[in-house]
């Protein structure tokens, strides 16, 4: 099982390659074998799943009902944007141009470790996202932990 945390600033090269921080790479499960799946995330970012975590997500999605239109739409969106990537010899993943365009990524990125996945954000999109949050971190934490 992979597990990620932290925030890192990196650049994107002209071929759409982004280096994964060493602190994140060391927490990729060996069963992932350097394989990742990159897909469209929520809030205009990209989700990067190591293969082991993608397999778990895929199993959960298989349990959704194809009879429900919202669930079908979710499946379509998730899988139509999903692309395989493997760490190269310089510990970079390659991101398809369509995904970079979706997330508004140009030359710089913010790489976030978010438990079972890595998120990749355009710095300007992430800053804007942070500004428009209607509630504070503390308020969200209170609501989330009350539900348990």
Image: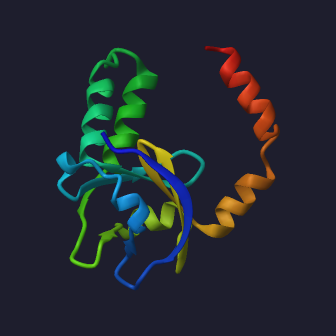
- In front of the other: 95 or 5: 5
Q: Position of residue 85 (x, y in %)?
A: 25, 61
Q: Position of residue 128 (x, y in %)?
A: 74, 59
Q: Which residue is painted at 38% across and 76% down in the image? A: 16
Q: Which residue is painted at 68% across and 68% down in the image? A: 124
Q: Residue furthest bottom?
A: 14
Quarter placement of the N terminus: top left
Q: Which residue is painted at 35% across and 33% down in the image? A: 75
Picture layout, residue 61 above or below residue 103: above
Picture layout, residue 34 above or below residue 58: below
Report the number of discs. 0
Q: Which residue is painted at 30% across and 72% down in the image? A: 91
- In front of the other: 125 or 147: 147
Q: Position of residue 26 (x, y in %)?
A: 33, 58
Q: Is residue 53 left or right of residue 14?
A: left
Q: Is residue 130 left or right of residue 84?
A: right
Q: Position of residue 14 (x, y in %)?
A: 39, 85
Judging from the image, the colouring scheme is rainbow
- In front of the other: 73 or 135: 135
Classify residue 109 by image quadrant. Answer: bottom right
Quarter placement of the C terminus: top right
Picture layout, residue 23 above or below residue 70: below
């Amino acid at each position: 099982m992979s597990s990620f945390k932290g925030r890192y600033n990196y650049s994107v090269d002209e071929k759409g390659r982004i280096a994964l921080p060493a602190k994140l790479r060391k927490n990729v499960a060996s069963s992932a074998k350097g394989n990742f799946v990159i897909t469209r995330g929520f809030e205009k970012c990209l989700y990067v799943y190591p293969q082991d975590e993608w397999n778990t997500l895929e199993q959960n999605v298989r349990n959704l009902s194809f009879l429900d239109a919202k669930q079908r739409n979710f499946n379509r969106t998730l899988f139509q944007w999903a692309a395989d990537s493997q760490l190269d010899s310089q510990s970079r993943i390659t991101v398809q141009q369509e995904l970079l365009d979706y997330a508004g990524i140009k030359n710089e990125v913010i790489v976030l470790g978010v438990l079972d996945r890595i998120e990749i954000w355009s710095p300007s999109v992430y800053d804007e996202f942070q500004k428009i949050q209607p509630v504070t971190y503390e308020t969200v934490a209170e609501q989330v932990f009350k539900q348990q």
